[in-house]
Amino acid sequence: MSTMHHKYTNQLAREKSPYLLQHAHNPVDWHTWNEKALRKAKEEDKPIILSIGYSSCHWCHVMEKESFENEEIGKYMSANFVCIKVDREERPDVDQIYMEAVQSMGIQGGWPLNVFLLPDQKPFYGGTYFPPAQWTKLLDNVRTAYDQQRDKLEESAEQFAHHLSHSELQRFGIIEDEQQMEKQAYRKLLGKVYEKFSANYDKEKGGMKKAPKFPMPSNWLFLLHYHFYTKDQEALKQLQLTLDQMAFGGIYDQVGGGFARYSVDEAWFAPHFEKMLYDNGQLLSLYAETYSFTHKPLYKRIMEETVSFISREMTNKEGGFYSALDADSEGIEGKFYVWTYDEFHQTLEESAEMLADYYQVNREGNWEHTYNILHCSESEDSFAKKYELDRTEFSTILQENKLKLLHKREERTRPGLDDKILCSWNGIMLKGLADAYATLQDTGILELALRNAHFIVDKLMRQQGNRASLYRSYKDGKAYLEGYLDDYAFVVDAFIAMYQISFDEQWLRHAEHLTVFVVDHFYDKEEGFFHYTNEDSQLIARKKEFFDNVIPASNSAMAKNLYRLSLLLDNKEYKEMSERMMNRMLKILATDPAYLSNWACLYMEMMQPSLEVAIIGEESKAYAKALLSHYIPDKLLAGTETISELPLLKDRKAIDGKTTVYVCFDKACKMPVHSKEAALAQIYENKDFLKY
C-alpha cells in the first residue's frame, strides 16, 4: 500500500482485512495478533492493548475517529503499550477468549472491545467504547498501575486466566453422566422448551419482547419444526407473525432486498443498517423452509429479492461472497437507504402518492432529520384492495417502481464494503441458496450456489488424501488463516445440502473429507465435544462453543452434521458421537432454549424415525425436485441415474428400467414404487412418523 499521502503508516498496511486497513494510517503503532508482536511485549516489558472490532461496527469507527486518529493519544499508546488490533471476523478465537474475560470482570461485552493484557497474554482489565477523555485517563491509570502495582495486576490476571482455563462443561452444567433420549422424556422436555419460548413472545410485532430485536433465525426454525411435529397452531402463528413483520419492517431493505443486522426498536422499524452475510444466509433458509410449508407469496418474494441482493452486491467475480456492508456512508448511519419526501416523489412521479402511503413516507419524515425509512404496515393484498387494484396489478406497479428507486439509490455514495470472504459465512449463504433452490427450483439460484461451492473447493479447501482442511479467509486472490470449527461446520452443512439438490456425489465426499479432518484435529475425546480451534492453537485457552446465538454454535452444527452423515454414509461412529453430544445437552436444554434452539431442532430430528429416500433411474433428479419442494423437515435424499456405491444406493436399481423410489424409516424400507405420489403416500402412512 502506498504511503505517499499519509503522515503515518503502521504494520496494518500489509493486511487484507478492510477493518485493519482502516487503521493502517492511525498515529498508533498498531500490530496484528502474531508471534512477533507478542514477543515485542515480553522483550520490552510493556502491557498490551488489544483492540478488537470489525469493519461494519459503528462505534468502532467512532472510537477510531475520536481516539486512534488523535496524534497525542496515538503517541502515548505507542510509547507505553504494545498495541494490537484484531478483526474479530478473521480471528474469532482471539475475540472469544477476551470477550469472555471482560464479561467475567462484570463488564457488558460488545465492540469495540478494548482489553489490557500482561505480556504473557493474560488479561487484567477491559471494556468496550471509551470517549477520548475517559480513554486518555484510563491509559494513564493502567500504565501507572503496571509500573507501581505490578504484583496486583499479575494476581488479577492470574485469576482471569484461571477462569478462562475452566472446562465449559463444568461451568454450564453439561453433565458427564448422560441422560438417555427416550420418547416419554422427549415429549415432556420438548414441551418445556416450547413453554419457555412462548413466555417471551411479542404477540403484536413478532420476535421476542425486547429491543433491540435480532432476527435469531434458528429460534424461528425451531418453531416451524415444532409445529410440524406437534401441530401446535400458536407456534405456527408466532412464526408467521415474526416473518411477516420482519418482511414489512425497515430491517428489510424494501428497495434492494436483504436484511439489516437488527432493529433498534421493538417494531422491526429502524435498523442498524449494516448488512451481514450470515444473517441473510440463515434468513434465506428460514423463509425457504417456511414458504415450502405455507406457500405464502410474501416469503417467495423475500427469497427472490434477497438472492438478487446477494448476487448484485455481495458476490465477487470468482463466486465468493463478501462479508458485510457498513451501516454508514459519508459518515452518516443509514444515509444510503433512507429517503426524503421530495426525493421519493421526484423519483416515482405518478406512482409516488400511492407508494408513499404503502411505504409510510411523509413530509416530516418518519425517522430522523426529515428522513423516511421505507416500511409497510399491511400486505400487498390488503393494500391493493384499498386502491381498488387486484394483487397482480399492484405487484407489477410495485416492482416497476422499486427498480426506479434502486436506480436512483445507485447514484448515492455507497456504504463501505467488507470484501474479505469468510469461509464459514460462505457456507451459511451456500446452505441458504441450496434451500431456496429446493423450494423455488430456479436455475439461476442453482448456478449461483454451484459457483460458490466450486469457489470454496478451489480457493479455500486443501485436499489431503481422504481428508480436507479449510482456510478461514480469502481476499485479493489469496486464502489465509487456518479454519476454525465454524468454518468446517457450516461448509459441511452446505455440502450436504448441495448433494441433496444435485445428487452430485462430489459434495458428499467433500463433506466427508472435511469431517474426517475436523474429528482428527478438533475433537476432544474426553469431553465428547469439539474445540473451536485446532490442536495447534497457541492461545492461553482453547474454547468450545455450546450456545446458539445469532449464528448457531459450531458444536450444535457439527452434531447435526455428524448425525446426517451417519445416515448418508452408514457411519456408526458419527452417530454415536452426535448422540453423545446431544445427550449431554439435555439437562440444560429446557433452562435456556433461546440459546439452544439449534440443539432443540436436532433433538426433534433425532427423536423421529429417520426418513431416507433413495431414488434410482433416469428421472431421479426430477423425482427429487418434487420431493424437495414438499415440506418434510429433516428428510434425507440420495439418488443416482445409474449405480452408486453410497450406502443408501448400493445394490439398488431401477426396477424394470423405471425410475424407482425406496422409502425407508430407520433403515426399514417400504416396497419400491415408481411415482412421486406413491412415495409421498408411503411417507405419510407411516404411523410412527410425524407424531409427537
Image: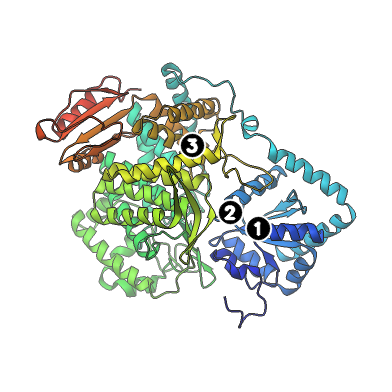
- In the rendered image, residue 541, in percent from the top left (x then y), is placed at 67, 43
Mark with earlier residue (2, 1): 1
- Identify which amino acid the numbered label 1 is placed on: Trp
Image quadrant where residue 383 sits: bottom left
Query: Dot 2: few (<14), some (14–19), or many (≥20) neighbours within 10 Å?
Result: some
| Mark toward the viewer: 1 or 3 | 1
Q: Give the residue type at disc 2.
A: Arg
Residue hosting label 3: 556
Q: Would you name the residue on which mark 1 appears? A: 33
Q: Which residue is mark 2?
A: 91
Secondary element at tag 1: loop
- 2 over 610 or under it: above or below: below
For the C terminus, give its image quadrant: top left
The vertical placement of 217 against 401, above or below, is above
Residue drawn at the location 53% of the way across and 69% of the way down: 332
**Image location (x, y in percent) of residue 624:** 22, 40
In which quarter of the view is residue 686 placed? top left
Q: Are marks 2 and 1 in contact (CB under 8 Å)?
A: yes
Position of 144 relative to 342 (above/below): above
Q: Secondary structure at mark 2?
A: loop
Extreme-left residue of the structure: 656
Q: Is residue 488 above or below residue 87?
A: above
If you read the primary sequence from the N terminus, does the residue marked by circle 1 or circle 3 appear first? 1
